[in-house]
Amino acid sequence: MKHSIQKEIIVVLALELIAVIAACALVTYRNFYSSALKTSRDDSRNAAKAAGTIISEYGLDAVTDPENKELYGKIRRRLRAICKAFELDYLYIYTIEGNDECHYIMAVASKDENDRIAAERLGLGTIRDCHPLHAQEQAAIKGEISDELLILRNEFGGDMTWIVPFFDNNGKARALIGADDALYLYNAGITRHFFVALIPISLLIFIAHMVLFFIIHRRIVTPVKTIANRMRTFDPSHEEEPLQVNSQDEMRSIAEAFEKMSHDIHLYIENIASITSEREQSRAQLDVARKIQYGMVPASFSENRNGVDVSALMQPAKEVGGDFYDAFTLENGNYCALIGDVSGKGVGGALFMALTKSILRDRMKQIMDPAAVLNKVNDDLCAQNPEGMFATVFVLVIDPKTGVVTYANAGHNAPLLISGGEVSFLNPEPGIALGLFEDAGIRNGNLTLKKGEGFLLYTDGVTEAVNTEKAFYGAERLLSLLKNNTPKESSAAVNAVKNSVEEFFTGCDQFDDITVLSLFFRSGETVCELKPALEDFRIVKQTVTEKCPGSPNAKKALLACEEAFVNIVSYSGASYIKFSCSAGGGILTVTLKDNGIRFDPFAGESSAEKDFESFDKGGMGISLIKQIAEKTEWRFENGNNVLTLTFKI
Amino acid sequence: MAVQKITKGTEVTLKVDGWLDTQSSPELEKAVSELESNVGSLVLDLEKLEYISSAGLRQIVAAHKKMNGKLTLRHVQPDIMSVLSMAGFDKRLHIEA
């Protein structure tokens, strides 16, 4: 603390104490001074008058008679007795001749030493210059008495002198009698009286101040410190004992005010804590909902098998959204893809989404007909939808052997069709969102895709994305995006849309889930990109095995594929291997495309005749490929080795 | 793939079952390299071998070298046999049906 009330009070009280004591001292001193002065004056004058009376008994002439030494000595003794009795320093009698000559008649002193000196130096007939005359002397000459103070400091010491006139029997002022009161005695008297009076007064004042200080300390400083200490150590997490402030005054009311405030703060904090924990709980619930949503609808999905190339992605908005998609193979070998959007967000939306998606997948696997399924699911949802939520859904089923697509719409955005090098909006019957009205009457549409043609399905999070200028992304922008750069595979289509929309709303929050699904028809061809690692051969193994069910040559074809794959992994330095595989008409075609060093495996001599003993050094693989494959082809194309193997199955 | 070792006197039989390909061949390599030096002859029982690739063939050649030719392939199935033939093993190795 920079300043302390207590210190300031001490300083102020100390200064006041000093000032009061000083004032008392001054007053006391003045009182004692004037009373001492008066005492000194009266005593001295009485002494002088007594001396005058003695001299009068004999007459001044007798005293000044130089022959009558006996009388002079007698009077001197009597005067000295008076001098001692009145505690004077000196007592003397003199006349003033002319204007400034003192003619001493007699001088006595109380002290023996002084008296001897006085007898010697101020004896009868001693003349001293006393110019100028003092007011008391001037008055005495006229027979009067002056109160003008006369302090003499000469070889006889410092004295306060009082002079009275000596009158003869005729009442005429004949001489002056001086009585010297010793100044040091006078001063000592004043000082003694002064301190005798001042010390008790000072003590009283000091005690009064101490009492005042203790009152202030007890009533103000201590309570302030107690309150300040409580404020400093105030811990909002727990309530403390009531403040102990021993007073009933303003301090008490400050303490009470603080206690009320801290109590209010405790209540407030408890309140906030409970609100926060409730909020935490609901956030945790939302997190769970979001995890459920992610679990049900993965952020991205890609599959390329059995003639269908599908990619999808969902980028959820901040909240748990209601978008979903699904893609799976049906029991009859057809492939189903669907996309949807439920009306609500948050936990409710997620639950409704989960319900709708589960029922859709279930029903599709049973019924396998899009319109029939949508109508059935609509009835299911209408029957158990107290919240009046609804979902828009587009479902399509493709026959991977023929490219025939059956689709049905339940109020969802019209998908884009990429067909014949053109991109256009498919124009399905709009249908009606699921969960609103029974008997939706949704009907199937049909079309046939050629190889390399496909769809782009999306939710309104794409077309209704908003940029910084509050403009919508819009269907036209989506259409022209795909028209300008028509994608040839699903992943390209999905990524193009995602990047375009993200670029569009840069700087704004994403308001709605963005979900895109693309499907391309590949006619029995499987394409996938593999890592150049031995463990990825399992994908080749699985695909080739699937494509040649029950064929006696499957394992040999697989052997040739393994040899080719291992060669690329071991020697090419490629960063990827693009594998495609198609089967039809008893022929299996496998293509391996890698970006490693250019190498034609079939360029060298056939190693079939290679020495058996050096076989373990390698090099047999290519010989095996050539023996097993019906046809082998290698070409170098756009920086890629493209190896095509054809097998009879 | 599984490799099972059966010792009968100085003759050791390794039963090799399943797929002997690039990824699994190190298992056979290990089994062969761990054979004691007193083994007189080695038999590879291929009765339950379903698949063999060049990596597997290389291990057979390595075993042949290690045993100084005292290697017999036993219970070779037709599928496997055709691969062995393609590699010319039928002319160089002692193969029992």
Image: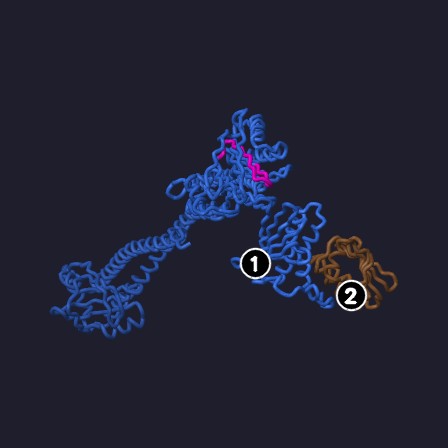
Residue in front for this viewpoint, A194 or B28: B28
State yes or no: discs 1 and 2 in contact (Cβ < 8 Å).
no
Instruction: State which chain is coloured blue.
Output: A
- Name the element at disc 2: helix
> In the rendering, at what x and y percent does residue A243 appear?
49, 42
Q: Give amino acid for label 2.
A: His
Question: Where is residue A626, by image quadrant?
Answer: bottom right
Task: Point out the stretch of residues depicted in magenta.
Answer: A397-412
CA–CA distance in space, label 1 to label 2: 38 Å
For the C terminus of chain B, give its image quadrant: bottom right
Quarter of the N terminus of chain B within the rendering: bottom right
Q: Is residue A245 left or right of residue A404?
A: left
As rendered, which of B36 and B76 lies closer to the eye?
Answer: B76
State how the image is colored. by chain
Furthest toward the right, the residue is B9
Q: Which amino acid does label 1 sit on?
A: Arg
Q: Position of residue A558 (x, y in %)?
A: 68, 53
Q: Which label is found at residue A635? A: 1
Q: Would you say A70 lies left or right of A473 here?
A: left
Q: Colour of chain B?
A: brown
Would you say residue A398 sits in the magenta stretch?
Answer: yes
Is A351 or A148 nearer to us in this picture?
A: A351
Give the residue at mark 2: B64
Instruction: Identify the chain of the residue marked 1, using the numbered disc in the image.
Output: A
SS state under label 1: strand
Q: Number of callouts in the render? A: 2
Whether A638 is drawn above or below A439: the answer is below
Tell me if residue A218 is in the magenta stretch.
no
